[in-house]
Image: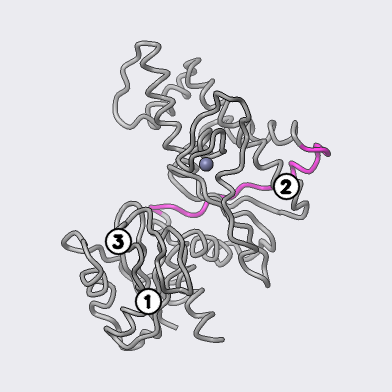
Amino acid sequence: MSIRVIEIGGKGVRRADVEGKKIDIVVVPQNQLYCLERLVEFATQNLPIETKAVAFSSAGVIEAYDLIVNSPNVHWLDGERLASTVTKYCGQPAFVFNDMETAVTGMAELFPELSFFLGATWSSGIGERLYRKGFGIVSASEGGHTMVDFSPYARLCGCGMRGCIEAVAGGLSTIQRVVMETQTLGIVVSGNPCSFLDRAYQSGDKWAREVYGGIAVAMGVHLATILQFNLDLQAVVWKGTFAQHALRLPGIEQAIRASMRNHLMNHSWEAKLTFRLVPEPPEAIEDAESFIGAATLATNLLNL
Ligand SMILES: [Zn+2]
């Protein structure tokens, strides 16, 4: 079943026609989109006749697969009934899905051997959903805002609380930390602060090792908590720029696992939880799992 998918991400808007796990050419808008009408035009442009529905993947709170209550990336979509507008415009059924739900549904398609996993976006922020085969996404979640640091000086999070895993280990907070640490030490940061951190870590610089050490301990505590609530959890499927870089550095996964073991009642539980990374370019299209997941969710709703 061919589904037109539009991904509204932090890096902009992209569209592709998707059939099962097959993603056709990804198209980006020629001009910047600045209002609902332009987005609807872009979403429905050159719609193949075999298209059965139009599906959007967007961050934020979405109601009834239609109303975007708030869109943290694209504020001019706040309060808009995007799906109804598209259906009125082109006559096709349309749905709007939360981007974590499309990503994790797509992960389930890419890793069919997993019956119960945590899908985690580790990027500027941290988003998580548990997925159980035969049931789907277990629940909405704000796992990125569970606390790992209870000290009064814990880092302030974008959500307004202190010490959330996102505030301790998220990419945005890591950039702030790198800027602060290097300023204090009189080190000049060149290029992207996270890439600078990775290079310093690989060179064995003490400050960079300490930054990653703190991140790994916090992530281990966080995963141990999730695991103790869900002892049959098999894997964490990671996506996101931060995960793709950090988890490929030597020693980081091991450090997270060591921290998990230290915070589990039974240390052997740690070994059961495997880490997977979604395929990234050049092997796959960027955010392929979101495109596949949005098409899967739309197909499921059409088949109801
Ligand atoms: Zn928070």
Percent x, y of residue 218: 61, 33
In the rendered image, residue 274 lying in the magenta stretch gets the answer yes
Please state which amino acid type lies under the numbered disc 1: Ala
Q: Which of the two labelled residues, at mark 3 and mark 2, occupies the earlier sequence position?
A: 3
Q: Viewed as shown, does residue 93 lie left or right of 42? A: right
Left or right placement of residue 143 versus residue 89 in this view: right
Q: Do the numbered discs 3 and 2 sit on residues whose CB atoms are within 8 Å?
A: no
What colouring style does the render use? one colour
Kind of residue indicated by mark 3: Val
For label 2, count other residues whose C-alpha is less than 10 Å away and answer few (under 14), some (14-19) or many (20+).
many
Span highlighted in magenta in the image:
264-282
What separation in Å lies between label 2 and label 1 (alpha carbons)?
37 Å
Q: Earlier in the sequence, mark 3 or mark 1?
A: 3
The answer to which quarter of the image holds residue 180 is top left
Q: Is residue 100 above or below residue 89?
A: above
Q: Which residue is mark 1?
A: 83
How far, Cα to Cα, is label 3 from label 1?
16 Å
**Which numbered mark, 3 or 1, is in the foreground of this view?**
1
x, y percentage for residue 163? Answer: 56, 33
